[in-house]
Amino acid sequence: MRRIRANAIAILTVAWILGTFYYLWQDKPRASPSSASQPRAAGVKSHLPKSVTHPPRGEPQGQLLGTFDEKAYLLGKPLRPGDDPYREHAFNLQESDRLGSERSIRDTRHYRCASVTFDPDLPSTSVIITFHNEARSTLLRTIKSVLVRSPAHLIQEMILVDDFSSDPEDCQLLSQIPKVHCLRNERREGLIRSRVRGAGVASASILTFLDSHCEVNTDWLQPMIQRVKEDRTRVVSPIIDVISLDNFAYLAASADLRGGFDWSLHFKWEQIPIEQKMARNDPTQPIRTPVIAGGIFVMDESWFNHLGQYDTQMDIWGGENFELSFRVWMCGGSLEILPCSRVGHVFRKRHPYDFPEGNALTYIKNTRRAAEVWMDEYKQYYYAARPSAQGKAYGSIADRLALRRKLNCNSFRWYLENVYPELRIPEQKVTYSLLKQGELCLESHNSDSLRLAECKSGSGIPASQKWTLMEPQIRQQDLCLAITAFSSGSKVRLEPCSPKESRQKWKPRGPALQHVISGLCLDSQPPVGPPITTQCRPQMASQSWEPKLVT
Ligand code: LR7
Ligand code: MN
C-alpha cells in the first residue's frame, strides 16, 4: 500500500516538473524583431528534420495522392553531383530533396491555441499557388503539407498556376493528385497576374494564397477561415515561420511581430506597439497589422473581387502587398495576423529568377503605382526616400483611380491616423521664400486675395510674404495659389490646398511662374491691382518673380 502511494507521489512530482518546464518554455519571452524581411526566429531550438513522418490524419497515404507517382516525380530532376545546390533556387536543393515529400514539424503555436474551437460548418477554400521554376521537392512538400494538415472537407481544391516555368511537367504531373489542378501561363506574367488568373477559376467562396515553398503547420487553416467567415472584410494571414534556406530546419517565428514599412515602401517586420502588447492578455487573439507580407493569406472571394482583386499592371514581383494592404484598410476592411495559425516559408536572400525589365525598375514601377493611387499627398515622402523613382515609367493608373473613387475609400491620411500612427512622418524641411518683383513682394491680404507690397526684411518679414514652393503648389501654410478661370485675365487667389486640384498647379518657367494646365503666367498687371494670369512672356518685368530664400 505504502509502495503504491510512494509511486503515485513520484509520478505526480515528475508530471508536475515536466508541466512546469513545458509552461515556462511556451511562455518564454520572444526574441526582438529583425528589420529584414525574414522574421527573427523565437528563442527556441530549431527542429532539425527527422526521418519520422506522421501518417496523415484521416486519409490513408495512397488515397491522398491518387495515381500520382511521387518517387518518379522527385527523381525526375535530381541534383547532379558536383552542381552547386544553391544555384537554381537560391536555397539548398540538396537538403530539400533529402527531406522528400513530407516530414513532421514541431507545432510552433502557443499551447493555448490547441484548445481554441471552431464552427463545425466552416466553408471550404480554394488554395492558390503560383510558381515560376520552383524546385519539385519544395513544391510537392507545400502541396502535401496542405493535404495532410488540413481537414479534408475544408480543401475544395488546389489551383497551381505555373508561371511559364521551363518544364511544363513540373505542374502537369502534379494534377494527378486528387483536388490539384494545374494552369499554365503561355508567357511569363509574374505572381500578380498569375494569382488573379488562379482566383478567376476558383470555385470555393474563400481564397487561400500560398507561396510555392511553404509547409503549413498543425490546424493552420481553421483559425483563418473562422475569422473570414465571421466577417468577410477581414483579410488574415498566419504567423510565418522560417524554414532555413541552408538546412531546411523549421524555426518558430516570434509571435510579437506585425507587418510594417518605411517610406521607400520596403516591407519589414516590426514589434507590436507596446500599448497593444500590454493589452494582449490572450495570446490566441488576432494581431492587427498595417500591411501583410503578401504571400500567405486568406480572403473572402466576393470581397477580393469587390475590392478589385489586384493591380494587374504590376509585373513579376513586389509592391502588390502594399497596394492590397492600403486598399483593404482604406476601403472598409482590415488585416490581421492570427497567432494560432502557423505556416513555414523558405526565406531567401536573392531572387533565383530573372526580371525581364530588371529587378529595380520592376519594383519601382509596382511601388510607384501603389504610391500614386493610394498615398495622396504623402507620396512626396516615397519620392523623397526613393529619388530614383522619379521619372520612371509606371503606365496608366486611370482604372485604379476610378476603382478607388467607386469604392469611396478613405484617404491615406485616415490610414496613417487610424491604422499606422507609428509610422514617423519625416520632418519637412520647409523653406520659405519671398517672391520679389523689383522692390515689391507678392503678399496675401484678407486671407484669400493677393497684392504687391513693399518687401520687408530680417525679422520683420510677415507670414503674408512668406511662400513655400512645393512644386506644383505655391503655398502659404494650408492655402495654395489658385487661378479662378482657365482663360487669360483670370484672377488669382488663395484657397485651401488640395493635391488633386488642377487650378493650384504651377511650375517655374525661367523667372516666371506658369500655371500648368492653362499655360498662362502669373502677372502683376495692372501695376498695383491684384495679380492675374496672362500669356507667358517670361522676360517681362510684370511676370518675373524672383524667389529669395528667407529663414
Ligand atoms: O515571376 C514570378 N512568378 C511567380 O509565380 C515570380 C515569382 N512567382 C512566385 C514564386 O514562385 C513564389 O511562389 O511567386 C511567389 C513569391 O515569390 P518569391 O517566393 O520569390 O518571393 P518572396 O518570398 O520574397 O515574396 C514575398 O513578397 C512578394 C512581393 O511581391 C509576394 O508578396 C510574395 O507572396 C511574398 N511572400 C510571402 O509573403 C511569404 C513570406 C515572406 C515574407 C516577408
Ligand atoms: Mn517566397
Image (cartoon, rainbow, N blue to C red):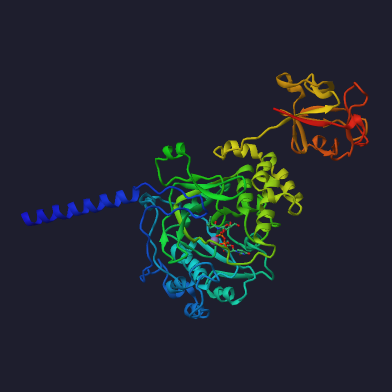
In the drawing, does residue 465 fall left or right of residue 289?
Answer: right
Q: In which quadrant of this rendering is ligand 1 seen?
A: bottom right
Residue 144 percent coordinates (x, y): 47, 68
Residue 519 percent coordinates (x, y): 89, 39
The one nearer the camera, 222 or 286, is 286
- Residue 67 visible from this viewpoint: no
Locate the N terminus by quadrant: bottom left
Q: Residue furthest left?
A: 2
Q: Quadrant of residue 521?
A: top right
The one nearer the camera, 490 or 539, is 539
Q: Quadrant of residue 461?
A: top right
Residue at point 42% right, 54% down?
41
In the drawing, does residue 247 fall left or right of residue 129?
Answer: left
Locate the C terminus by quadrant: top right
Residue 234 percent coordinates (x, y): 55, 47
Residue 332 percent coordinates (x, y): 62, 42
Residue at point 65% right, 45% down?
382
Name above or below for residue 114 compared with residue 141. above
Name above or below for residue 547 compared with residue 516. above
In the drawing, does residue 349 fall left or right of residue 467?
Answer: left
